[in-house]
Amino acid sequence: MSKKIKRTKVPKTSASGIRSTKLKPQGISFSFKYYQDGHNKFSCNGKAATYWLTLIDRLKALSGLSNQELLVNRSSTLRCHPIRWEDTSENGFGLPNEEQLVDTPYQFSLSSNEHGRGVHPSFVIGAGEARANYKTKCKIGMHPGRVHGFLIDEVFYIVWLDPDHLLYRAQG
């Protein structure tokens, strides 16, 4: 006759008593993993403290958005859109394996005034869809500074800080 094996009861907590938790996505995170400060056009050496404070304020404000909210946002202070390399002074970021890594590069603006301090951008999510076949760029308000990078899931990888808006050739 066969012996019955008793079902093992699995405890709902670990032996240490620590329960696992599942985190819901909280918004975009920013990474400097691919940041290139050594680029001759996109160096921020010597920038005033207000520039860095404005950058931190902007990243903090954007971290409350999902990647989809960032991409469809048509706010005039954010100016987030794909980068079309053929319209710029560069051929790409110059990253190893960039074709496999970067689907769409983006740019966004820092702030809506010259230094951005004291201004909290209002993000009005507009209708429409992000164009997946274009590189996106997000601008920093009316300040000429821009942040260039790319998204993978909920992480925006910052590649260049462009305080003087030098990515685009002078139109004239």
Image (cartoon, rainbow, N blue to C red):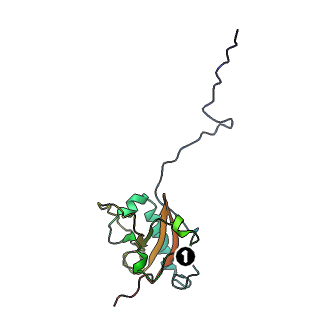
As drawn, the residue found furthest toward the bottom would be 172
Residue 142 visible in the snapshot = yes
Quadrant of the frame with the C terminus? bottom left
x then y, percent, for residue 148: 47, 73
x then y, percent, for residue 46: 55, 85
Q: Quadrant of residue 82?
A: bottom left
- Type of amino acid at the residue the image marks with label 1: Gly
x then y, percent, for residue 39: 56, 82
> Badge 1 local density, few (<14 within 10 Å), some, or many (20+)?
few
Instruction: Label 1, secondary structure: give it.
Output: loop
* Residue toward you, 149 or 91: 91
x then y, percent, for residue 103: 47, 65
Q: Residue at x 36, y 75 (%)?
A: 112
Q: Which residue is mark 1?
A: 94
As drawn, the residue found furthest toward the left would be 127
Residue 78 visible in the snapshot = no
Considering only vertical position in the picture, is 168 above or below 27? below
Q: Residue at x 56, y 83 (%)?
A: 45
Considering only vertical position in the picture, is 139 above or below 172? above
Q: Residue at x 57, y 68 (%)?
A: 97
Q: Residue at x 35, y 62 (%)?
A: 72
Q: Is residue 140 left or right of residue 124?
A: right
Quadrant of the frame with the N terminus? top right
Q: Quadrant of residue 69?
A: bottom left
Considering only vertical position in the picture, is 23 above or below 115? above
Q: Is residue 40 left or right of residue 84?
A: right
Q: Is residue 10 left or right of residue 66?
A: right
Give the tally of numbered discs: 1
As drawn, the residue found furthest toward the top would be 1
Considering only vertical position in the picture, is 125 above or below 137? above
